[in-house]
Image (spheres, rainbow, N blue to C red):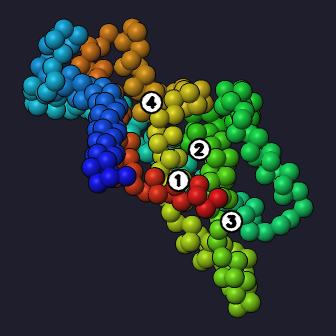
Amino acid sequence: MSASQAFAANRYVIADLWTWRFLKWVVAICVAIVAVFPIWWMINVVFADPGAPVSINPRLYPTSLSSGLSKIQMILTETQYLRAYYITIAYALLTILGVLFIGSMAAFEFALFDFPGKRILFGLVMLSLMVPTVVTIIPTYLLVADFGWLNTMQGLVVPGLASAFGLFMLVQFMRTLPMEMIEAARLDGASHFKIYWYIALPLSKNAMVTLAILTFMKTWGNFAWPLIVAPRPDTYTVGQVVGLFNAPFSHQTVDVVMTANLLAAVPPLIFFLIFQRKIVEGIAMSGSKG
């Protein structure tokens, strides 16, 4: 191949690389616009003067900061939104603590030790991932009602403490823990619980953080279970309060409904933006190591 032919071939290769890179950026920008635009439009509707048209000539930027703040203040002071915030935060935090504690203890045993029926039990747990949640709602509700846990925090929290996905994720991660360290701790006289608490948990911090974030996102947006097990107004979660604003006969204006939806979306958005790197790192690490 002559020098001119080699130069032409390299030029075509560079052109193809630049074309491919340009197309990837175009696709990424389009996906970002599709994902972000509904949230941005909601913000524009909230921070606009009351009575301004929404569907006709939609605005691409906020027009009235004071109007938006007054709507937020009105919803927080004249409705049960703050109480719903408190209940939802407590519901999410208690669920996270329970899922991490129970899931990590079970994953510690499944990943690092052998016991009779281990494969069968783990297979049953994984089989539960294939069962739609709606199938288990009625028997779970009847069980909670028999315990007298309707309209209580334990009725909201306890049924969600056993997470099959969380167990699978932590098992995949803990299988990579060095057994030499565990055996050394056992020879030094450490008990089974101390090995779990002082060795397995610190080494599994990335997976635990990822599971905590994913559990928060799932719990905060949970609507069906709180609606079924806690229908009393003083136990409403944020999802239930937003559902009241979005009801067909709520007689609320569009900007007020959008304000309620924005207040519900802000905490998980902030949570995700702060910890998004941890989510990606934890899932990638658990998947690659598993």
Where residue 166 appears, x then y in whole percent?
A: 62, 51
Please give the label number shown on residue 283. Answer: 1
**Reading the chain from its start, which is encountered first: label 2 or label 1?**
2
Q: Nearer the viewer, mark 3 or mark 4?
A: 3
Instruction: Work out which residue is located at the far front of the displayed protein and give it.
Output: 2
Q: Report which quarter residue 259 is drawn in.
A: top left
The residue that label 4 is drawn on is 239
- As measured in the structure, the alpha-carbon distance from the residue carrying label 2 to the one carrying label 4 is 15 Å
How far apart marks 3 and 4 lie (CA) works out to 37 Å
Mark toward the viewer: 1 or 4: 1
- Give the Cα distance between marks 1 and 3: 15 Å
**Label 1 neighbour load within 10 Å: few <14, some 14-19, many 20+:** some
Image vertical order of residue 158 relative to residue 258, above or below: below
Q: Please provide percent x and percent y for residue 210.
A: 50, 55
Whether residue 236 sits left or right of residue 158 in the image: it is left
Sequence-earlier tag: 1 or 3: 3
- Dot 3 or dot 4: first in sequence order is 3
- Residue position for label 2: 157
Q: Earlier in the sequence, mark 2 or mark 4?
A: 2
Closer-to-camera residue (127/85): 127
The type of residue carrying mark 2 is Val
Asked whether disc 2 touches disc 4, contact meaning CB atoms under 8 Å apart, the reply is: no
Q: Amino acid at mark 3?
A: Arg
Q: Amino acid at mark 4?
A: Gly
Distance from disc 2 to disc 1, alpha carbons, whole Å, reads 25 Å
Residue 141 lies, with reference to residue 165, above or below; the image says above
Q: Mark 3 = which residue?
A: 175
Q: Nearer the viewer, mark 3 or mark 2?
A: 3
Q: Quadrant of the C terminus?
A: bottom right
- Answer yes or no: is residue 140 visible: yes
Local packing at callout 4 (Cα closer than 10 Å; few below 14, some 14-19, many 20+) is many
